[in-house]
Image (cartoon, coloured by chain):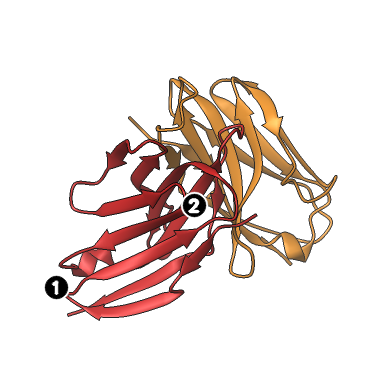
Chain colours: A orange, B red
């Protein structure tokens, strides 16, 4: 199994530009999570999908952030326009179907975003 | 609310033991433990469920006190490979199955 795949692994952009982060969950997993990690705020949940449907997006910082999951094998997190304070490592994680809590989350390698 | 982890950092020698604590202000359904090495993604270690069920790493143990809403991770006879940042993730009772992570405990094992 390839694990959770994220792209790009590194992204450097200028303030005001649009940024799109991509995630391919593990095949068969029905829950997908987007996290942001910074030194100041730690690991924060941004949004959570179950069966491709957004369940909780209360962690999305503001309207500049949007996430989609058009099918079971692909999700995107978009920031438009990007700001320097968005600089962070963004992780995608997936979890096996069943909806039971005793299944662990598998994290992707992350995308390190730098907004200049 | 974010669970509180303690200590924030610990340094030990190979072979020594360590305990990392995680405390929540909410009633919990489960506690998850992850370890993250520098520049890498968090990796699953252990899940503890309300009612006593556990699933996880053979060489790492943990406890979950549902009444006190606390969990502890026990690292015995530590190895160099145990170094990293340990996070607890809590799943509140009745939640939609997402985790809230603590701020992490940085563990350094010296030879």
Q: Position of residue A51 (x, y in %)?
A: 59, 19
Which label number is shown at residue B4? none
> Residue B16: x percent and y percent?
18, 74
| Residues at marks 2 and 1, CA–CA distance in whole angstroms | 29 Å
Please tell me if label 2 and label 1 are on a single chain.
Answer: yes
In this rendered view, identify the residue nearer to me: A17 or A27: A27
Q: Which residue is mark 2?
A: B69
Chain to which mark 1 belongs? B
Say which residue appears at 33% left-offset and 58% top-offset. Answer: B73
Q: Quadrant of the C terminus of chain A?
A: bottom right
Q: Chain of mark 2?
A: B
Residue linked to disc 1: B15
Q: Label 1 neighbourhood size at 10 Å, few (<14), some (14-19), many (20+)?
A: some
Which mark lies nearer to you, 2 or 1?
2
For residue B101, above or below residue B29: below
Residue A14 place in picture, x, y as percent: 77, 61
Vertical position of residue A28 compared to residue B14: above or below: above
Q: Quadrant of the N terminus of chain A?
A: top left
In this orientation, which residue lies closer to the viewer: A82 or B72? B72
């Amino acid at each position: 199994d390839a694990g959770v795949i994220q792209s790009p692994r590194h992204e450097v952009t200028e303030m005001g530009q649009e940024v799109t982060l991509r995630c391919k969950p593990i095949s068969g997993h029905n829950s997908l999570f987007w996290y942001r990690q910074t030194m100041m705020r730690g690991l924060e949940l941004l949004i959570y999908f179950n069966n491709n449907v957004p369940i909780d997006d209360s962690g999305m910082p503001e309207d500049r952030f949007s996430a989609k999951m058009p099918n079971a094998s692909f999700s995107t997190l978009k920031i438009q326009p990007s700001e320097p304070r968005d600089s962070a490592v963004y992780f995608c994680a997936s979890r096996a179907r069943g909806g039971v809590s005793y299944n662990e989350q598998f994290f992707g390698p992350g995308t390190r975003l730098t907004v200049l | 609310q974010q669970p509180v982890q303690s200590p924030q950092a610990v340094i030990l020698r190979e072979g020594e033991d360590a305990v990392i604590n995680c405390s929540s202000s909410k009633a919990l359904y489960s506690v998850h433990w992850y370890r993250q090495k520098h520049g890498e993604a968090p990796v699953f270690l252990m899940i503890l469920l309300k009612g006593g069920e556990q699933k996880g790493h053979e060489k790492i143990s943990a406890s979950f006190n549902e009444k006190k809403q606390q969990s502890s991770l026990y690292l015995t006879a530590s190895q160099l490979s145990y170094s990293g940042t340990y996070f607890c993730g809590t799943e509140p009772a009745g939640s939609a199955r997402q985790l809230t992570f603590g701020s992490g405990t940085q563990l350094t094992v010296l030879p």
